[in-house]
Amino acid sequence: MREPRLAEAPTTPCTTLAACLAAVLDLPLSDVPQFRADQDPATGWQVARWLGGLGLGLVRVADTHSFAWAGPWIGRVAAPGAADRLAVVMFGVPSGVLWDPSGVTGTGGWQLVDGFVVAALDIAGARPPRVEAPSGTGTVEGIWVAADAGAPAISRLEIEATPAGLAGDRHVRGTGTFPSGLPGSALTLIQAEVCDGFDPPLAPHEHRRNVVTRRIELNGLVGRDFEIGTVRCRGMRLCEPCLVVERYAGPSVLRALVHRGGLRADILAGGTFRVGDAVRVA
């Protein structure tokens, strides 16, 4: 997702929705039509017909306050005393405000009123291409576990790995923020290069990932078996940022970590790995 260039902050339901659609679809703002102000821009025929020409549509979210999506979706918010619903881009499980073109969420008292997901009309033809497998070999730069949700991240030089997770970690104990035992819940990884891109660098108590790697593209491990030392794992899905990580981190990290938040993986067989071990495609 890339925010469009704006000459000035949009201030109406039509202009904020157009800006958010441009951001979600990675389009120049000039490619989005000017929506009519005499109808609800999110539910009117003008939006439906334009998106239909792209093979897309807007699906209304039934309950925005409980809705969570590991991708961008459009929420509409109201400020105190304002009748207009201004659009923002939401992201994450749980979701937080990823981009607010009007700046209305920078003030207190705003409320999320409704929301929409931009969806493909034919999902079979809209799946993103698979990222190529990384060809090089990375290394383990750090190993971190936390006993419970919100507990301090503890460094380990060596760790025992089981299909349930890392010894002593919340994912094994079932005391984390998210459920344990589901696919992709045993192990989380993040690239050191991503952490180094923040000033100061993103710390383990902020990113909350188990393993920090260097010199390997983790996104390319989704759907592939890989090894950490002699421990065999399988990449299940991207570990996208969410409101939980945003709360732990000092700076705002939600936008900066989109598609760069690391990897969720299963551990296929138990073993031990340590800092300095190789990370490679199996």
Image (spheres, grey):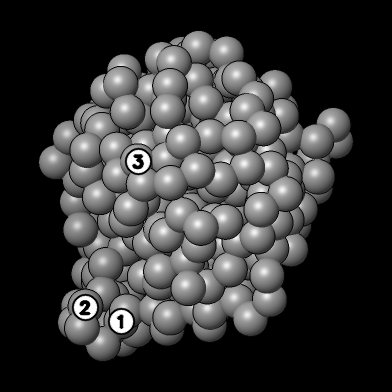
Identified at 43% across, 81% down, the residue is 130
Whether residue 16 sits left or right of residue 234 in the image: it is right
Asked whether the beta carbons under mark 2 and mark 1 sit within 8 Å of each other, the answer is yes
Distance, label 3 to label 1, CA atoms, is 36 Å
Query: Which tag is nearer the camera, tag 3 or tag 2?
Result: 3
- The reply, left or right, for residue 125 in relation to residue 109 is left
Amino acid carrying label 3: it is: Thr
Q: Which residue is mark 3?
A: 162
Pinpoint residue 170: horizontal percent, then vertical percent.
38, 23
Q: Does the image show residue 195?
A: yes
Residue 117, x across and y down, in percent: 29, 56
Q: Which picture quadrant has residue 157?
A: top right
**Residue kind at label 1, given as amino acid type:** Ala
Give the residue type that dot 2 points to.
Ile
Please provide percent x and percent y for residue 102: 59, 40
Q: Secondary structure at mark 1?
A: loop
Q: CA distance from mark 3 to mark 2?
A: 36 Å
Residue drawn at (54%, 21%) of the image = 247
- The residue where tag 1 is placed is 126
- Closer to the camera: disc 3 or disc 1? 3
**Crowd class of label 3 (few under 14; some 14 to 19; many from 20; radius 10 Å):** some
Q: Earlier in the sequence, mark 3 or mark 1?
A: 1
Instruction: Kindly indicate whether the residue at mark 2 contacts the one at mark 3 (C-beta within 8 angstroms).
Output: no
Label 2 secondary element: helix
Residue 21 seen: no
The mark tally for this picture is 3
Q: 10 Å neighbourhood of mark 1: few (<14), some, or many (≥20)?
A: few
In the picture, the disc for residue 123 is 2
